[in-house]
Amino acid sequence: MRVRWDRMGRVGLLLVLLAVAGLYVKQGLSLLSTHAQAEQQMAIVRRLITENAKLERERNSLNDPATIVRDARALGMVRPGERPYVLTGLPNH
């Protein structure tokens, strides 16, 4: 039996080509996976930035003296020296 070196060479080249192509496919899939993870993380960052801005506005509102007075009055508090009045017997509408 005679070895056909030309055919063995082609088969060897084909195997090397398939191995290199497999490595490129693996790296491509890894790149796509990393890109998807990055997109998920960016979505979380955008949500947290929005939530942080909302909390900043709320904090600024709560530090406003007018808001403090309004909330205190809603709780029934009065300033020193003021007289509290309670109205009773009013009809409910």
Image (cartoon, grey):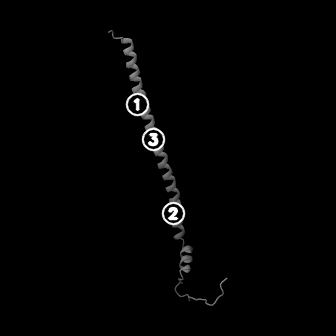
**Residue on which disc 1 sits:** 23
- Number of labels in the image equals 3
Q: Assign a secondary structure to mark 2.
A: helix
Residue name at image x 53 percent, y 57 percent? 50
Q: What distance separates the C-alpha of mark 2 from that of mark 3? A: 33 Å
Closest to the observer, 26 or 58: 26
Neighbor class of circle 3 (other Cα within 10 Å; few <14, some 14-19, many 20+) is: few
Say which quadrant the C terminus sits in: bottom right
Of residues 32 and 65, which is closer to you in this image?
32
Residue drawn at x 47%, y 42% as measured from the top left: 35
Residue extending farthest to the bottom is: 89
The image shows residue 51, relative to residue 67, as above or below, that is above
- Amino acid residing under circle 2: Leu
Q: Are marks 1 and 2 in contact (CB under 8 Å)?
A: no
Q: Amino acid at mark 3?
A: Ser
Give neighbour class at mark 2: few <14, some 14-19, many 20+ (Cα, 10 Å). Answer: few
N-term-proximal mark, 2 vs 3: 3
Specify the amino acid type for callout 1. Leu
Q: Could you say where residue 67 lies in the image, as x and y percent from the top left?
A: 56, 73
N-terminal label among 1 and 2: 1
Percent coordinates x, y for residue 80 in the rendering? 52, 86
Q: Nearer the viewer, mark 2 or mark 3?
A: 3
Disc 2: which residue: 55
Along the line of sight, the residue nearer the viewer: 30 or 46 = 30
Q: CA distance from mark 1 to mark 3?
A: 15 Å
Farthest right residue in view: 93
Mark 1: few/some/many CA within 10 Å (<14, 14-19, 20+)? few
Q: Which residue is mark 3?
A: 33
